[in-house]
Amino acid sequence: MQKRPSWPQVSPLRRAPAGGPTDGSRKRFLLAKVVMAGDTCVGKTCILSRYTEKSLPSLISTIGIDFKVKTVTIDDTTMKLQIWDTAGQERFHTLSVSYFRGAQGFVLVYDITNPDSFKNISTWMKDIRQKAGDEVEIILLGNKCDKEHKRVIQKEKGERLAWEYGIPFLETSAKENINIDNAFVMLAKSILTKKYSLISEHDVVNLNEKKTRTDCCKL
Ligand SMILES: Nc1nc2c(ncn2[C@@H]2O[C@H](COP(=O)(O)OP(=O)(O)OP(=O)(O)O)[C@@H](O)[C@H]2O)c(=O)[nH]1
Ligand SMILES: [Mg+2]
């Protein structure tokens, strides 16, 4: 049986460097859990690999689960994205959705040349809502936009579906490196914006906590 990987050795609580910045500004560090979701073969692993390693992986369908860590800086906040790459094959479905819990963001992918992968987006959305709640940030990606000659899902259909769900949408190509960085930066910004109220004044943030001030902070 496939052994679950352990969580990466990064604490959800991150502190600004000792002494802090000398210009009076406060640097912030956040850790966010992001999950790649969507049918098998839509290109989740290729998208993640293109983003984190600037290359495509040797081609093998994901077995079980894997993760990568990528740091992204947005304004004065450094975000460490812990990105989980789930397997889209039906036989891994239970395992894959079990990793949805506790995520702050999802990259939900279909393949513009595969109508079933587009149809199944509604099922993935239900899984996300059920396991991760209504407050998570999601971006919808129509991948393989380099394969225009094989396109069956028009861009407008993807845009309309995303609009119905109230989430952002991009067409991407992991192969041609189109909109890959954009997608993750957009998602990271949405996570940051949503959680912004938790951050003010503090340089220690746990995105999973409802409050950031503890009793020891009271005068
Ligand atoms: N033309 C083209 N092919 C792509 C692109 N992204 C992925 N592929 C191809 O699609 C196939 C599946 O890619 P994967 O990244 O393994 O798909 P996956 O969604 O991770 O699949 P599972 O791990 O089984 O869930 C591979 O043959 C890739 O080369 C893309 O942007 N354009
Ligand atoms: Mg994969």
Image (cartoon, grey):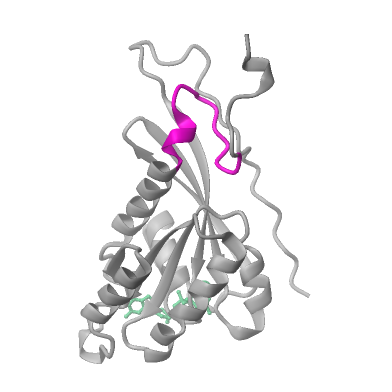
Q: Is residue 166 magenta?
A: no
**Nearer to us in this view, 4 or 162:** 162
The quarter of the displayed image where residue 178 is located: bottom left
- Vertical position of residue 135 compared to residue 157: above or below: above
Magenta-colored span: 195-209
Q: Is-magenta flag for residue 198? A: yes
Asked if residue 125 can be seen in this view, the reply is yes
On the image, the x and y values in percent for residue 56 come to 40, 68
Overall secondary structure of the magenta stretch? loop
Can you tell which quarter of the image residue 109 is in? bottom left
Q: Is residue 54 left or right of residue 94?
A: left
Residue shown at the point (27%, 62%) measured from the top left? 179
Picture quadrant where residue 159 is located = bottom left
Q: Quadrant of the N terminus?
A: bottom right
Residue found farthest to the right: 1
User: Residue drawn 63% across and 59% down?
Assistant: 101
State whether residue 96 is above or below residue 54.
Answer: below
Examine the rendering and report whether any part of residue 100 can be seen. no
Residue drawn at x 35%, y 30% as measured from the top left: 76
Work out which quarter of the rendered image holds the C terminus and state it.
Answer: top right
What is the x, y in percent for residue 29?
48, 32
Is 50 located above or below residue 2 in the figure? above
